[in-house]
Image (cartoon, coloured by chain):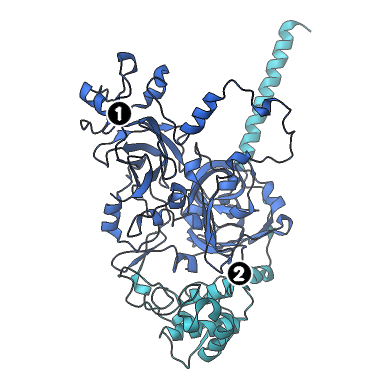
Chain colours: A blue, B cyan
Amino acid sequence: MLEIVGYSKGHWGIPNIKERLNLGGIVEVTPKTMEESVAGNGLLHRRIFLAQAGALLGVGTIGMLDSGAVQAQNIQGRPPWMLAPGKGVGAYGTRARFEAHVQRAAGSAPGMTGSGASRTPLQHLQGIITPNSLHFERHHSGIPEINPDEHRFLIHGLVDRPLVFDMDMLSRYPMISKIHFIECSGNSRVAGLIDEPVDQNCGVLHGLVSCSEWTGVPLSILLDEAGVDPDAGWILAEGSDAAAMSRSVPMAKAMDDAMIAIYQNGERLRPDNGYPMRLFLPGFEGNTSVKWLRRIKVTAEPTMTRDETSKYTDLMADGTSLMFTYPMAVKSVITSPSPGLDLNEPGVYEISGLAWSGGGRISRVEVSADGGLTWGEAALSGPVLDRALTRFRMAWRWNGAPAVIMSRAIDDTGAIQPTRDSIIAEKGMNFAYHYNGIQLWAIDAEGRAVNTYA
Amino acid sequence: MLKGERLTLMHRQFFISVVASIVFIFEVCAQEGPNLGLEATVEEIVAWDISIGPDGEGLPDGAGSVSEGANVYAAQCTACHGEQGKGQVSDRLVGGHGSLTGSAPIKTVGSYWPYATTVFDYIRRAMPYLQPQSLTNDQVYALTAYILFLNGIVDEDETMDAQTLPDIQMPNRGSFRQAYP
């Protein structure tokens, strides 16, 4: 058993000889390659990955060991792809066929074609940007096929001048680009609000979140041109799908950072993300970023649509319900290791995951490998952006014994991702939306990870 | 041209271009926007505005009774929502009273929905699932009346229209709180 070192910031603890014997006993640690323990059960300072002695330390690769071994045996042969010219250039790219297994997890209600969701396979992706083809989907009556030449966008209601725009007009407005996550407020419900832990992978449990660079026109410019009445407190946004999905949004948000998004990760929006235009509301629950946007009505009060009353409201344990719970709370999840990505042998691994908050930037992510007894601070890797997915990384020496690993995120408002128990104590089990509890993965002695509650 | 004069000229050109840039930036910032939108006519707005406020704002002319609604329901709704709104492949519409604090809450129009106007709005915009916006306003009023009747909210002989519908008090209305503002 390792000593409990607690918070790790600035900690330079050097494992004593007893600890080393318990760390799998693979290598003799020399002063040059000493592992800096930052928390219990093998969490290490990630500086270990920078040390040139990484190979000596036995750095493992998750789920890759076998293919690595085969390659090593064949290293003297000439691979067939070197013996003839490859395929030529093409007008539109496709991914390697060996990656075809990386798929969204899709499901829809029987007999309800078009109404359903598909989830981003978070466990197979790296960095913070979600490829457009793997961005999660949630549709309420299918994906409309909209001819952009025929699409019109109306702003009306409490305005001086009701205005109609077409796509050509909108394309002439000054545009902005922002990298933001979008998350369905029903995300992670199956990860925490079911009586028994659901045995599924990270994408199925948490994949109703994705992150893109969104480019479009600030909504405030268009509202200013229409001339918003001082009595206006809200807007109603309506989609051009068969559900005419509609939501009310506070005017303050509409005038602050709302965007009419036209591009996603450099290309025009895909049909499943609102082509030819969608509302985009940074940090708000995804349903409010209405896709296939055709109409904004400026109103004094919320319209009380079906999707902000009977759905997307949070039912508390006492039977009351909260409406307009817009911001997505601070959350994180370890994407690797995670169910389906096994550890092949004891050794040093990188724990990697994603953190995000509708409240702002991620300021810190902490990781525990001993079931929450001790925590070490993970490195935030790559850009740390306002209301964007943020990649975190942590080094871990897995000693081959069963372990429970987890992460918790803290944002720059000071909000801390809570435990499942504390959320349920506060809200009960029926609230269905905005669940952001800490995700635990139990690693068994074979190196397999599963969803667990304790 | 002497070397010094050329430099002076270059400086002057540079100075002019900087001033021009500043003026340009100032003008861009001072602009409200490109003002490319076309003013919408009343007819265009009426044709597009299908949303109904909780105070009944936007409710169209027309009316429908519970008995008429029963007929429309049998033809258009039973396949997905079951006999008398008891649920099938799609949401149950009836019952669930007292279930919201239990372990399996049943959210129906009767047990959960806070506004009757939303029933009209949602049926008209999105139902029937395979032919949305195909019902007449009279049919939508009738369906609304029938579903409210099934939930014990209106009597069997009642008719819904732009005057009566906004006055309906939904049983669960008092249980909703707004997190915003």
As shown in the figure, which amino acid type bears the numbered disc 2? Asp
Q: Under tag 1, what secondary structure?
A: loop
Residue shown at the point (43%, 87%) measured from the top left: B154
Chain ID at mark 1: A
Question: Could you say where residue A191 lies in the image, as x and y percent from the top left?
Answer: 38, 53
- Compared across the picture, whether A97 is left or right of A391 comes to right
For the question of whether residue A377 can be seen, the reply is yes
**Along the line of sight, the residue nearer the viewer: A222 or A168:** A168
As displayed, is residue A126 above or below residue A219?
above
Picture coordinates of residue A373 (x, y %)? Answer: 23, 39
Q: Is residue B142 left or right of A434 when viewed as pictured?
A: right
Instruction: Please tell me whether mark 2 sits on a helix, a strand or a loop.
Output: loop
In this picture, residue B13 sits left or right of residue A9: right
Say which amino acid is labelled 1: Gly
From the viewer's perspective, tell me whether residue A309 is left or right of residue B3. Answer: left
Q: Which residue is mark 2?
A: B49
Q: Quadrant of the N terminus of chain A?
A: top left
The x and y percentages for residue B52 are 53, 72
Q: Quadrant of residue A151?
A: bottom right
Residue A24: assigned label: 1
Q: Residue furthest right?
A: B1
